Amino acid sequence: MIIGIPKESWRDEQRVAVIPAGVFALVTAGHQVVLQADAGLGCDFTNEAYDEAGAKLVFSAAEVFERANLIVKVMPPSLPEVECLAPGKALFSFLNFDVVNARLMARMVEKECTAVGYNLIEDDAGNLPVLMAMSEIAGMLLPQISGHFLATPKGGRGITLGGVAGIPAAHVLIIGAGVVGSTAAEAFVGAGANVTVMDTDLTRLRQIEKWLPKKINTAMMTAYNIDRYIETADVVVGAVMIHGQQSPHVVTEAQVRRMRKGSLIVDVSIDQGGCIATSRPTTHSDPVFVHEQVIHYAVPNIPAMAARTASHALNNVILPLAQQFADHGAAAFKMETALRRGVYLFNGQCTQPEIGGLLGWPAVQIEELLG
């Protein structure tokens, strides 16, 4: 099979889905890899490194999309990229709910595309392997993001995360105790912050207290508790995710209005629609905006800040799945449960009820289509 790796077209997106070591593995397994020149430069993987690994370099995304049977990329395709897809091709990428729109999906349907969303891939244990890898990186990056925007020159409260003698540490409120929230809690504690974690799942809160004993506070995620804690929070991290669905708004505009001037909101759920009512997507080159005197950071692709680390992590999880599809075609969906669960289009038919619901389309179970 011919596997295509285009250069990412999203603004400020420097990650690449397959690193040279992954290309070498695919070529060794008997496949061809077509790579758009400079696709890996943003994370310091040179064209020469890909060439030595066995990739065929081309100079346009259109050629990658036209030649390859399977396109492996990071971010969702743009409409111009979808227009380059020949009928019947397969696409692996993240599926961001904030960019799902009827026009783009309709063109993918017309192209009879088969598409897998990384954030939908779920193993038998209920883990989301690709999302977990990126969530860990995002969580580790949050203290340095927060410390940067809390600084006086950035319009923040002018405080440090960790306290000094006679001065208390910053109060960080993390809403959601999943992988992002848990990793962020550990990282913020390491930076010396006073951390409170909220979730609706008491078991998760118990787990995080055992993991970080006596270093954090936990509370049930209720409107009352959010009201209570948000007034004293210097940083609010929104990390609420419901698998395969848009994130619900758990913080209202009225609650944001009660926050202190120069405090910071980081909405990590923005790629799933956001869990803070006042959030809207931003970019790495223009990452914040101010609303109700509160700084909002809502970059959908936070791990791209550490593009090389994130690309290694993506490759480690994606490569076995991509190789299985390259080896067996659509039969791989029968063989690999996690991969099958990630399919949201199969030969142009919608297979995810949540996505169908967003667009007003009927959805067909992938098992029915595979026969």
Image (cartoon, rainbow, N blue to C red):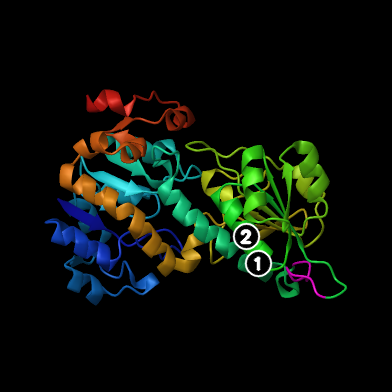
Q: Is residue 332 magenta?
A: no
Asked if residue 198 is positioned above or below residue 211 in the image, the reply reads above
Estimate the x, y position of residue 63 in percent, counting from the top left. 20, 58
Going 29% across and 55% down the picture, which residue do you hit? Answer: 319
Prevailing secondary structure of the magenta residues: loop
Q: Residue at x 41, y 26 (%)?
A: 361
Query: Is residue 163 covered in magenta?
Result: yes
Circle 2: residue type: Glu
Residue marked by disc 2: 186
> Badge 2, how many Cα within 10 Å: few under 14, some, many 20+?
many
State the image coordinates of residue 256 (x, y, percent, origin top left): 76, 48
Residue type at tag 1: Gly
Residue under numbered circle 1: 190
The boundaries of the magenta stretch are: 156-164
Placement of 94 over or under 245, stated as above or below: below
| Residue sitting at the far left | 30
Q: Let me know if residue 249 appears in the view.
A: no
Residue that appears at 50% across and 66% down: 305
Q: Nearer the viewer, residue 60 or 275?
A: 275
- Within 10 Å of disc 1 (Cα), the crowding (few <14, some 14-19, many 20+) is few
